[in-house]
Image (spheres, grey):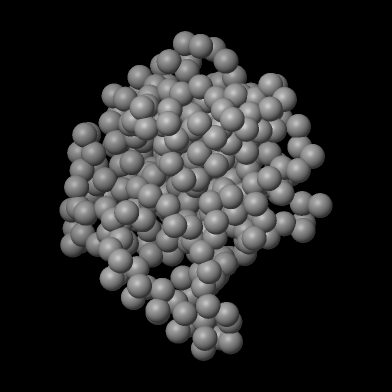
Amino acid sequence: MADSFGATSTTDEVLAGVNLRGKRVLVTGVSAGLGVETARALAAHGAQVVGAARDLAKAEAATAPVRADAANGGGIELVELDLASLASVRAAADRLLDSGKPFDLVIANAGVMATPFGHTIDGFETQIGTNHIGHFVLVNRIAPLIASGGRLVNLASSGHRYADVDLDGPNFERTPYDPRVAYGRSKTANILFAVEFDRRHRERGVRATAVHPGGIQTELGRHVGEETLNAMLASINADLAKLGEPPFQWKTIPQGAATSVWAGAVARADEVGGRYCENCHVTTLITDGVITPVSEGVRPYALDPERAKALWAKTEAWVGESF
């Protein structure tokens, strides 16, 4: 049963008995980690996966397990996509639109974390530009391809608790750069984007949600040094000990990808639409109390519908395109 899934559930456990034959799914970021596992699990249950990646040669090698495990008519094809370049994003969207083939599910999985200060090709701070703005343009451009009954799943993070979005200074024009704050802003944006996309498309039967995969050791953390990581883990475990909780444990990649496939292919649409999910369930709001970096819960500002509308309007202005 769906309500029996939790933090340790894997993709294969979540999809047990689920037949995705005839379904078409777009997954961004299929050159490593969660993206590869997400694509593998979906193709193994019959889905035709379109995998998007910046480095097609790397993605071709990384997705060998997807092709090996594909069954019941499932498979994968690749499309080039650099989320840090709006020219690349628009070109990828045009290719998908030209094919005219609908999608039943879009999983915006790709992203970067805690990068040094820098900018995308279009001049946006790297993390907001890649994680939010690139996906915003891609998903909105291909929105007509998402069939009624389809879903959008945005990969967010508990890192959204680091910061709300800054609608007036997205590129750190007004504050010193902090990689964790930049990541937090981008992940809050991912959630708010799902909230507003859901509001705009639910009348035609398309729903959107945001998910936190949990703590997993993947390439996403390549910019976090070992010393910083060890200090972070020590602090987390100290907080957990005070609460009488066991030490933190990393999720495996199949456990980390489970919430994405649960929200996209297993959970009821009305259950997850416009919501934030983790550990294979819809999570709760957190406003006070003792909160560790690994506690469950979502900050109210990340689900604020007015904030979501404002971010949508600002992002349209930033990219010079209305949807």
Q: Is residue 172 above or below residue 290?
A: above
Q: Is residue 231 above or below residue 184?
A: below
Q: Position of residue 264 (x, y in %)?
A: 64, 40
Q: Is residue 14 above or below residue 86?
A: below
Looking at the picture, tell me which residue is in the foreground, 322 or 117.
117
Residue at 48% x, 75% y: name it.
292
**Is residue 240 shown to the viewer in this render?**
yes
Q: Is residue 308 above or below residue 176?
A: above
Looking at the picture, tell me which residue is in the foreground, 166 or 126.
126
The quarter holding residue 59 reads top left
Q: Position of residue 296 (x, y in %)?
A: 57, 67
Q: Position of residue 167 (x, y in %)?
A: 32, 50
The quarter holding residue 58 reads top left
Residue at 50% x, 31% y: name it.
64
Image quadrant holding the C terminus, namely top left
**Is residue 104 shown to the viewer in this render?**
no
Q: Position of residue 62 (x, y in %)?
A: 45, 35
Looking at the picture, tell me which residue is in the foreground, 177 or 60.
60
The quarter holding residue 89 reads top left
Residue at 71% x, 42% y: name it.
15
Q: Is residue 27 left or right of residue 19?
A: left
Q: Is residue 93 left or right of residue 298?
A: left
Residue at 32% x, 54% y: name it.
222
Tally the numbered discs.
0
Looking at the picture, tell me which residue is in the foreground, 323 or 10.
10
